[in-house]
Image: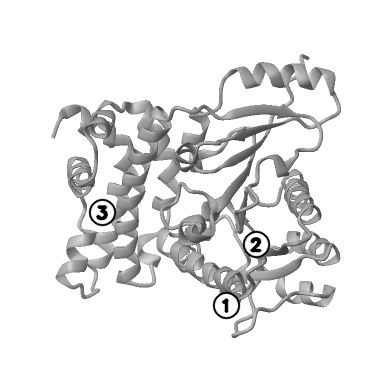
Amino acid sequence: MKKIFCTTFFLLLSLSVFAQGKLVKELGKGIVKTAAVESALRPITVPQMAYRVMSNSVAVSPKELSHWNQLNREDFYEAEKMLTDYFVLSPEKAPSQEMLERNMVLQEELVRNFLNRSYYLTHFKKEPTVLPVAGTIDYLEYIPYHSRVILLGEMHQLDWTIKEVEQAIYQYKNAYPDKNVYYLSEFVDATPGEETFLLGTQADVERLVTKRPYYKEITNRMIQAGLRVVGLENPQLSLRLKKQGGYSASFHETELAWETISPAAMEARNKYWTAIARRILLEDPDAVVFIHAGFGHTGYNQVRSLPWQLKEFSPFVVEFTEPKAGDFNMLLERSVPQDIFFKTRKLQAANPYSQIRAVVHFGDKRAALAAGCDLNIRRMENQLPR
């Protein structure tokens, strides 16, 4: 393996090697392992992971291989930041060997996905359109009529994001009265059963919005606006989270974290939610579903995320992010032209009391898949001079 390739993977997998070493030490205390599981969980060196990712990518073109080998430390610093959350869980708290083994598989997929996305984001031909906006964003200009699944990905509990989510849904509902518009929410508990339960009263909201009470108000407003409101979250998971005291500072050290935010848990939750959405879409030919959730579930940047599991319904992904796209998807930062900050400063000066947002639209689907979303709405920092 070339020295440069070993170097590029150093930052990416340093946390991985540490976590896996700790994991094997704990498993060695008495858990019986099969040969397959033991092999999957054995600490792996940086060159071994690099070789495995490349050797398993049988359809990789020479241009992609060349790009991979030219990646530098800065590029892999992005990957390290994006994947950090997957290595902060306590291995000894994992509920099963199967979950640990599955996490290893998903980690490798994340590495491969990062490499593929980095290549396409560097080489796509059509630049995104970027527009600073002071007033109301016209979401109908971007959301395609033929999409039956519109994903609204957020960073949790931000007032400005809630306003944008509502704007997008209300604009669509008012423009297309021929569509049956559903609001599916991660923040509302599902009601298990063969029939889809539509929330209709404030009592329903009080009973089913338990994981994050912050979202009770938007859920009530969606009902009042005539949306078909459906919960997505597994109620047993919400109940356990509530009993444990929610997302505390020590949450990452608990078994429940493994069953909530680990790669295997995210995959399982996405499958649970997908089953609810797919049932609606198949039973109601006029249905269009807006799925409101964290962008760890909604973006293209995760290999087992909602848009990939619902790809037959032409999904369109909108992400609402803070001034920085965040560590979770730093590839998105590469796609934003620097002149947007100059344009934002001018617009802020003309509208001193408005919140400026940058609207980044990837009209080219390949570019969208690489960046992680089709449309990024980014709150800009106040650019006024002091």
- Can you tell which quarter of the image residue 343 is in? top right
Type of amino acid under label 3: Gly
First along the sequence among labels 3 and 2: 3
Secondary structure state at the residue bearing disc 3: helix
Q: Nearer the viewer, mark 2 or mark 1?
A: 2
Q: Is residue 40 above or below residue 130?
A: below
The percent position of residue 231, horizontal first and vertical second, equals 66, 70
Secondary structure state at the residue bearing disc 2: strand
Q: Which residue is mark 3?
A: 21
Type of amino acid under label 1: Gln
In space, the residues marked 3 and 2 are separated at their CA atoms by 43 Å
Q: Is residue 256 visible?
A: no
Q: Is residue 358 visible?
A: yes
In space, the residues marked 2 and 1 are separated at their CA atoms by 24 Å
Q: Nearer the viewer, mark 3 or mark 2?
A: 2
The percent position of residue 299, horizontal first and vertical second, equals 52, 49
First along the sequence among labels 3 and 1: 3
